[in-house]
Amino acid sequence: MDVAFVTTRLVEKDAQGNFTEATLRELRKRCGKVTLFTFAYERSPVEGVDIRYVGGSNGHSIGANVRALLSTGKLARELATYDLLVLAGPDVGVLPAVHRAKKLNPRIRLFWVYHSLTPSEFLPSLKDRLLTMARKRAYLWSMMRSDTVQTFSFYVKSELLAEGIEDSLIRPEPFAIDTRAFATGDKRKIRAKHGLESDFVLLYVGRLAPAKRVDRLIEAMKGLDGDIALVIVGGGPERERLETMAKASGKKVIFAGRVPDEELPDYYAACDTWVTASEHEGFCVPIVEAMAAGKPVVVPFAGAMPETAGDAGLIYEQGNTRDMVACIQCLREDRKYYESLAGRAVDSAKYFDIGRVMPAYVETICNSGRR
């Protein structure tokens, strides 16, 4: 069976990119020809997997989407030579070629991998909102004409059901990471680097974007006394505003910026708990990374976050900073309960280990292509 894996881009040092790369490697073991069709590729090549740039060159932009649309016929004829098309969140410029390929070769199976999109109401600019709404309409149109739609949470499945996607098409499967990588961090290194030796450390890892509501984490610090610090790992458009807010708060808030993959386990090891105030997540990979490091998590009742955290974390009312503070205080003051949650975290993370998930996940993809 020959497989075309169609996606938007693969970037270096990214959990989704790591998962996609592992998927390609496993597909290469089990299938015949495996080709990656993408707008942009910023990682080391996967042995045995050819790359086609659907926008004509290695880059993702509106212009690249236009070029993909203009080459729909040529691209469709190439895609029609495959047995299975895996559509892992491809941008809209390639979708006409995908469905024309299906018409040229009705035996092709279409396997959609949908991560969810941030709802447009949480996006800061009109341009972002319009682009997301257009992308969502195109995705739904494509999924309704596919054979399988895979999600990484039951929450995202519920989103798709509400949009009219048939229940029989949707198959939730867990996302996965290499949990072993997060179980061996060196806490002393980071605590010494940032002067955190005696602090109860809250950690946030993720983009500094409006929908992530990192401002609420800084606001929550005002309700926490004593030796406590908030460490923020990541970058994004909100950083300057958040740094100004943190300085005005008078609290110990450290912006570590983007850190290399090899340092990330050290940050998780150095923290006492991982916390977020995000408005929406279709899965939330850092929850699993924190659990793999044996850390309880504090998350809002929003999106797929309670589902991903399971019984390894505390759930607070979305937007309620006082409730968030109460959860953090509970972990600070009740060491026995903290240790109980930490143990559950390690156990829960095993469910998302890539060694357990990947063989079954790729078998699901392959079975879809054999029907």
Image (tube, rainbow, N blue to C red):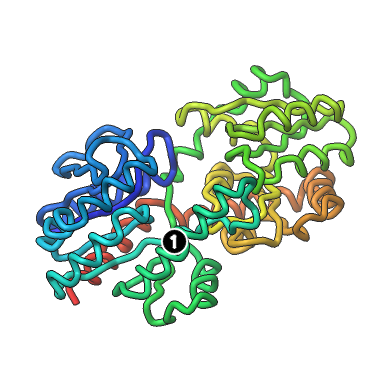
Count of residue discs: 1
- At x 65%, y 53%, the residue is 122
Q: Is residue 46 left or right of residue 313?
A: left
Report x, y in % for residue 25.
23, 47
- At x 41%, y 64%, the residue is 139
User: Which residue is nearer to you in this view: 71 or 298?
Assistant: 71
Q: Is residue 330 left or right of residue 41?
A: right
- At x 32%, y 42%, the residue is 64
Looking at the rendering, in which quadrant would you find the N terminus? bottom left
Report x, y in % for residue 68.
26, 49
Which residue is disc 1 drawn over? 174
Q: Check the image and report above or below for 102 versus 299.
A: below
Report x, y in % for residue 62.
39, 44
Q: Secondary structure at mark 1?
A: loop
Q: Check the image and report above or below for 130 versus 112.
A: above
- At x 54%, y 77%, the residue is 162
Q: Quadrant of residue 245?
A: top right
Report x, y in % for residue 67.
27, 45
Amino acid type, callout 1: Pro
Q: Check the image and report above or below for 7 versus 234.
A: below
Q: Assess disc 1: are there few (<14), some (14-19) or many (≥20) residues with their C-alpha within 10 Å of its C-alpha.
A: some
User: Which residue is nearer to you in this view: 343 or 94?
Assistant: 94
